[in-house]
Amino acid sequence: MGIDLFDHCSKRAIIQRSGIFAWLALILLTACSPRQPTQAFTAGALLDEVRFDSTIEWEAYSDLTLGVVGAVAEGVYRIDIDDGGFMWALHDQVETDVILEVETAQLSDDMDNAYGVMCRADPSANGNGYYFFISGDGYYTIRRGVGREVHDLIPFTYSDFIRQGKDFNRLRVVCLGDYLALFVNGVFIDEVRDDLYGAGTVGLTAAVPSGGDARVTFDNVLIFRAQQG
């Protein structure tokens, strides 16, 4: 679990007040029609299925002084962030190659945020791992965290396939070898290759700039073993 506060933030630049964490993002437009992934893969065995019927099904965190809460509530996992912040909550299962699926709902009025999932996160919750974010205003990014520094592998990029505002989006993330890919609502969005991390846990994550708030829920998490071909 990690918490950081942001001082100034937009999709073009998200900079932590301490200077440790910096996000520099360029705005790019995706094509109007769906692209196709360059890596062939299949979903193997179902490793875990989480419906959030129990409060102990996922890591919980609360820091009321920072205005950050992540916990199971009313059958979903909910992350609430007030006045800027960044957090993640990890699963307890270490895997290598996975396909992760999750239903998300963006509930806050403020759409300048980022929320999504992690793969290959360090079980010590030190911030290491891969981050897959979408935003309430239709952007996505894939990032690599090394401690408190999270750098873009793909910068914030607009996609017509991300539902904006208070709406639902289903995410599908592939972590297979050095291949990382993001699907939203059944549509392939983007991909990148990076070989820094080979194993770790999956996680749920959200971030919002100082002065903003985030209200996000996650449900029906499916974790499959990823296979080539």
Image (cartoon, grey):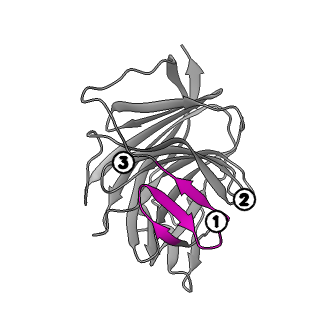
- Position of residue 87 in the picture relative to residue 113 (left or right): right
Mark 2: which amino acid?
Asn
C-alpha gap between disc 1 and disc 2: 7 Å
Quadrant where the N terminus lies?
A: bottom right
Provide residue 193's location: percent of width, then percent of height.
60, 29
Q: Earlier in the sequence, mark 3 or mark 1?
A: 1
Seen at 63% across and 31% down, the residue is 97
Does residue 2 appear in this view?
A: yes
Q: Are discs 2 and 3 less than 8 Å apart at CB?
A: no
- Residue underneath mark 1: 2
- Position of residue 196 in the picture relative to residue 52 (left or right): right
Mark 3: which amino acid?
Tyr
Residue 111 on the magenta span:
no
- Which label is found at residue 139? 3
State whether residue 25 is above or below residue 159: below
Seen at 60% across and 49% down, the residue is 151
The local crowd at label 2, few if under 14, some if 14 to 19, many if 20 or more residues have their Cα within 10 Å, is some
State whether residue 65 is above or below residue 43: below
Seen at 64% across and 32% down, the residue is 194
Question: Residue 76, located in which quarter of the rendered image?
Answer: bottom left
